[in-house]
Amino acid sequence: MRNKTGALLGALLAGLSIAAFSTPAAAVDLEAMKAHVADHQKLPEFQAPGEPFDARACMKDKKLIVVPFSSSVEFTGGVASRMVEIAKDIGFQYDHYRTQGQPSQWIQGINQGISQKYDLIDVLMPDPRALVPQGMQAKEAGIPIVAAHAAGLDTKPPEPFLMVPIDYTQAGQLMAEWVVTKTEGKANVLFLTAKDSFSAESVMSGVLPTLEQCEDCKVKQQNVNVVDWGTRLQPTVQAELLRDPSIDYIIVMYDGMAQFVVPAVELTQSKAKIVTFNGSPFVLDLVQQGRVEMDIGESIDWVAHAILDAEMRILCGLPHVTDPKAPLYIFDASNVDTAGTPPQVSTGYGDAYVEGYRKLWGLQ
């Protein structure tokens, strides 16, 4: 959910909800958590998601279309544009249907994919639950339709969508482990969610069970849906910090929310530290400024390669990829300058994947 404005629509909306609980007593293995966090502070290595294949041969004369959540959002627009470029290098057509975050545009893009007889339609991050009728039309036309990067490895997509997932659960687990270990198992956490997002349950399934292992940790949840970030997020956070000044960490589900959370922390003069997920350059800049403590990042270019790999395997009759192996990498004060000053897209992750995919696809 990279969205610097915080105002683009999710597809299914709900209201503001509040939940609070203290975690039950349980043994917490701080050393194991520290080791898991440390593993994601190392430059990621390439892992092949499947067996090698001759991409150029099996994709000859194929044409695909991607319909992103929004072409103007850094992440979804960037992934879509890179997939077009990578496909051109391999030798087949991949078209980018440009959108501005409007559900009507997603429908138009799918309809174009059907009417122009594309071989595959990629719906990149819109909630597929809102597009089932169009998905069924694609299926009836014999065209596979893929929900890419929309949810976690543990989420089943609605029929007839195929899924190219990401390990959102692990992202949630890492955020929670960071907080638990930094406080030596005594965290008082405000957890901010956006439950209208299709991936929210996967992130929560990583955060909450991890915190429940911590006997002396406290957690309060506040849900603010995507459409409300610009108006309700900052006052909600301010109210919570004033109500409980002992809150020492805020887990922010998506880093597009951070621009509204940082002012709330600063205006209340709270000592709470912010941890979040996505690695958007504008939030990495906040890490460089010391206003966000940690952001778990994904490389746009690596994700584009991973999605394209999974989709080519679908069209080439190869086993479906259930885990595309797109890595998560932790940025904090110790390494955030590797992302550039100011931070740049897809920078700081290393380049092991470039040669890895070229070999995997038989291009070298």
Image: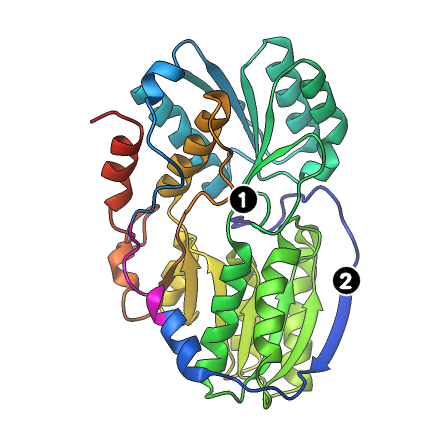
Q: Nearer the viewer, residue 18 or 321?
A: 321
Amino acid type, callout 2? Leu
**Quarter that holds the C terminus:** top left
Please state the horizontal and vertical placement of residue 129, each as a whole percent of the image.
73, 39
Q: Give the side of residue 114 with respect to residue 174, left or right.
A: right
Judge whether 81 appears above or below 235 on screen: above
- The single residue placed furthest to the left in the displayed view is 364
Residue drawn at 36 percent across, 34 percent down = 51
Classify mark 1: helix, strand or loop: loop
**Which stretch did the figure color magenta?**
38-45
From the top left corner, tell me how far across and down residue 60 is, in percent. 38, 11
Q: Residue at x 53, y 42 (%)?
A: 149
Report crowding for label 1: few under 14, some 14 to 19, many 20 or more residues within 10 A (C-alpha). many
Local secondary structure at mark 2? loop
Q: How far separated are the C-alphas under marks 1 and 2?
A: 27 Å
Q: Name the kind of residue labelled 1 in the image.
A: Pro
Q: Is residue 148 magenta?
A: no
Question: Disc 1 marks which residue?
Answer: 165
Residue at point 49%, 22% (across, down): 317
Q: Which mark is residue 16?
A: 2
Q: Is residue 91 visible?
A: no
Q: Is residue 290 above or below residue 118?
A: below
Rendering quarter of residue 84:
top left
